[in-house]
Image (cartoon, rainbow, N blue to C red):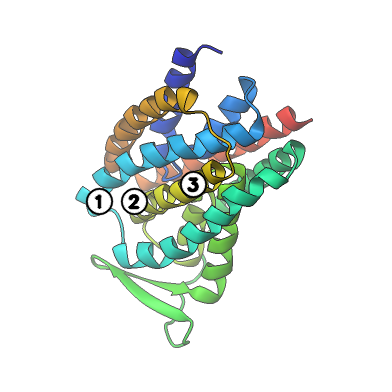
Amino acid sequence: MNEFILAVIIMVIAFLMTMTGRGGGNFYVLTLVISGVGINLSASIGQFILMCSSLMAAILFSKQKMNHWQLTLILGVMLFFSSLAGGYFGNYFNERFLKITFAVVMFLAAMLMLRKPSRKLKSDRKWVIMFKSGDQVFHVNFLITVPVVLFAGFVSGMVGVSGGSFLVPLMLLTMNVPMHVAVGSTTVLVSLSAAAGFMGHWGAGVFDWHLAIPLAIGGVIGGYAGAKMAIKSKPKNLKYLFVGTQILASVLMIVNAL
């Protein structure tokens, strides 16, 4: 497929995915795989595009105070190192396994988003910590959060998908974080996860600068426009966009793997 056409497709994907805090890494990989690029190289380039586009979006979201820096820092440390490990060890798995893993992760995340948020947790246990975001208060159970974040980071780095595919559902369902704050915070985390995953793939010698640069430019443009739109969008619309794109990604990848 022509690089210009690929860049335009990436730009559109970045626009839609940035609105939900996912970044679009899963669709970048899917697009590259369908165009004929190997899964490992697709994952590597996908992480690079995701790193660039989500960084642009994170800057815009931060200016609008749509992220929670304390929570972002805690989760970011775990996500960075687990994504780094996933990016490096992903090259030791066969392509069919990676594609199936990709599809399962996307489908599970979509199903989680259709569930109603859990009851608010009381901060009377040592592993449950209370956070504030403006006038809203939410509680984080780290017995649930830590293993899920580590798993999400490893899978996102290994397969080349965005950690937001699991982090947004995690924040909404177990922490009761407001949708806009979840999108803003997750975008920062996704940029860290993508950077770590990219370095893992690059360290393993899997990358192509000539293909990655023009696609990353398209991703940055789309990420900027998507962030602008997310700021103006209703939380309910963002949620349904998230679910719809997740299901679509999982179905297309399963078809591609068979």
Mark toward the viewer: 1 or 3:
3
* Mark before the other along the chain sequence, 1 or 3: 1
Q: Is residue 52 left or right of residue 59?
A: right
| Image position, residue 92 (x, y; %) | 71, 46
Up-down: is 249 above or below 108?
above
Q: Amino acid at mark 2?
A: Gly
Q: Earlier in the sequence, mark 2 or mark 3?
A: 2
Q: Residue furthest left?
A: 63
Q: Quadrant of residue 43?
A: top right
The amino acid type, in three-letter code, at marker 1 is Ser
> Which residue in the rendered view is the most extreme toward the right?
258
Identify the residue shown where x is 53% and y is 54%. Answer: 84
Marks 2 and 1 in Cβ contact (< 8 Å): yes
Distance between the Cα atoms at labels 2 and 3? 23 Å
Circle on res. 199: 3
CA separation in Å, label 1 and label 3:
25 Å
Name the quadrant of the N terminus.
Answer: top right
User: Would you name the residue on which mark 2 appears?
Assistant: 184
Residue 129 or residue 76, whichever sits in front: 76
Rendered image: mark on residue 62: 1
Q: Is residue 123 above or below residue 57?
A: below
Residue at the spot x=47%, y=14% of the render? 5
Nearer the observer, disc 2 or disc 3? Answer: 3
Task: State the CA–CA distance, disc 2 to disc 1.
Answer: 7 Å
Q: Could you say which quadrant of the image residue 48 lies in? A: top left
Task: Let me know if residue 154 appears in the view.
Answer: yes
Query: Number of labelled discs?
Result: 3
Kindly indicate the quadrant of the structure image that contains residue 228: top left
Q: Are marks 1 and 3 in contact (CB under 8 Å)?
A: no
- Mark 2 lies on a secondary structure that is helix
